[in-house]
Amino acid sequence: MSLTVHHLGISQSERIPFLCEELGIDYNLKLYKRAPKLAPPEYKALHPQGTAPIIQDGDITLAESGACIEYISHKFGNGKLFIKPSDPAYADFIYWWHWANGTLQPTVARVMMTRVAGLSEDHWIVALGVNRLNAALAELDKRVAGNTWLAGEEFSAADVMIMFTLTTMRYWSPYSLGGYDGILGYVERVSKRDGYQRAMKKADPEMELVLGADAPKGIA
């Protein structure tokens, strides 16, 4: 077994065990607890960025969610979970694959940072972030209300990528999914997948999964 997945608890690196379980590939999972909220020194020492996720394959050490997912899917999974350009659903896949980490997650993070900074809810920067988050959630809700998965009827890497932002990330940036029935149904569908259940039991066995509409109290 050459692939090692370094998982920082309650973080976006949960995506990588989820991916590996979906692909059915062997991997060595190493768990790291936060100290107390940030990554411990031994995790930060793995890569110059010091951020999750981080994977190692022999002499290769790789960071960044998208890079790790593409690397594993193509090297170990024969490209599984990546829709091919010849597929009619390719444009939908490529859009939502990038949207998950290029639009939704930065928008959630932006709202989190403005609140950490102590800005009032009526501050224009906070209002801008909240408006953009609401617009993003409305777009996503419409998409998954009419489609089983982000790319249509085929589960893909886009679904692996987005699940963290809709669930565990709400510990860090609490927001409600109330009124977004399409998203709640989608989260339920993903959470019932065997790959997701196995991954979360391995990666964060003590964490209560955030699968409902209500935002958790948060840990940040």
Image: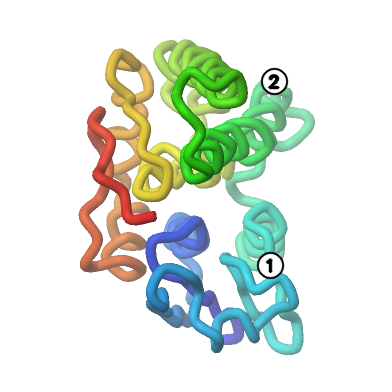
Q: Quadrant of the N terminus?
A: bottom right
In the image, what residue occupies the spot 44% across and 57% down? 18
Compared across the picture, whether 47 is left or right of 51 comes to right
Give the residue number, with chain letter if any, for mark 1. 63
Residue position marked by numbered label 2 in the rendering: 88
Dot 2 alpha-carbon crowd within 10 angstroms: few under 14, some 14 to 19, many 20 or more: few
Asked whether, in this view, residue 168 is left or right of residue 20, the answer is: left
Report x, y in % for residue 153. 49, 25
User: Where's residue 216, x and y in %?
Assistant: 25, 42
Figure quadrant of residue 84: top right
Q: Position of residue 34 (x, y in %)?
A: 41, 74
- Label 2, label 1: how far apart the Cα atoms are: 31 Å
Q: Is residue 163 above or below residue 200?
A: above
Q: Nearer the viewer, residue 59 or 195?
A: 59
Q: Give the total number of marks visible in the rendering.
A: 2
Asked if residue 213 can be seen in this view, the reply is yes
What secondary structure is marked by label 2?
loop
The image shows residue 54 at horizontal and vertical percentages of 61, 72
Q: Amino acid at mark 2?
A: Pro
What amino acid is labelled 1 in the image?
A: Ala
| Residue at 55 percent of width and 88 percent of height | 42
Residue at image location 42% in from the left, 23% down from the top: 148
Instruction: Using the image, determine if residue 19 lies above or below residue 126.
Output: below
